[in-house]
Image (cartoon, helix red, strand yellow):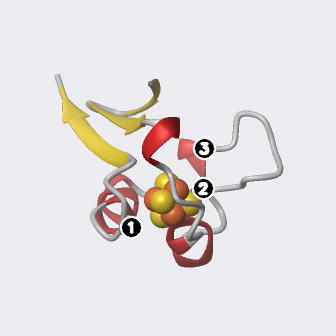
Amino acid sequence: MKTYEKEDIKVVWEQEKCKHAAVCAKGLPSVFKPKEKPWIQTEGASKQEIIDVVSKCPSGALSIKKD
Ligand code: SF4
């Protein structure tokens, strides 16, 4: 599991659940960049935009954790 911070939340990514459907990369390409490292760059969009795309991840690999 990896986490990526954005203000007061963390984007959690569980690699073993990821089905590479690319809903995230298509929905918010300024943040989810599968070819780059780190592949999630939270500075690329607002917190709310990130939350919205994370909620659409079909496999549950992406989730939001609040402190
Ligand atoms: S939307 Fe979810 S399952 Fe699809 S590539 Fe992104 S993290 Fe993986």
For marks 2 and 1, the one nearer the N-term is: 2
Identify the residue at image location x=43%, y=36%: 14
Q: Are marks 3 and 1 in contact (CB under 8 Å)?
A: no
Relative image position of residue 15 (x, y in whole percent): 52, 38
Element class at badge 3: loop
Q: Residues within 10 Å of mark 1 (few under 14, many from 20)?
A: some
Q: How crowded is mark 2: few (under 14 residues within 10 Å), some or many (20 or more)?
A: many
Residue at mark 2 to residue at mark 3: CA–CA distance? 6 Å
Q: Is residue 61 left or right of residue 34?
A: left
- Within 8 Å: ligand 1 and the Cβ of disc 1? yes
Residue assigned mark 2: 31
Relative image position of residue 41 (x, y in whole percent): 62, 43
Q: Would you identify the image quadrant in which residue 8 lies?
A: top left
Residue assigned mark 1: 53
Element class at badge 2: loop
Residue placed most toward the observer, 61 or 49: 61
Query: Which residue, as the protein is rendered here, is positioned at the far left?
Result: 67
Relative image position of residue 16 (x, y in whole percent): 49, 38
Residue at mark 3 to residue at mark 1: CA–CA distance? 12 Å
Residue at mark 2 to residue at mark 1: CA–CA distance? 10 Å
Q: Mark 2 belongs to which amino acid?
A: Val
In the rendered structure, find residue 40 and report the number of the disc placed on it: 3
Quadrant of the image containing the N terminus: top left
Q: Mark 3 belongs to which amino acid?
A: Ile
Q: Is residue 56 left or right of residue 2?
A: left
Q: Do the residues labelled 2 and 3 touch (CB within 8 Å)?
A: yes
Q: Do the residues labelled 2 and 1 touch (CB within 8 Å)?
A: yes
Residue placed most toward the observer, 38 or 9: 38
Q: Mark 1 belongs to which amino acid?
A: Val
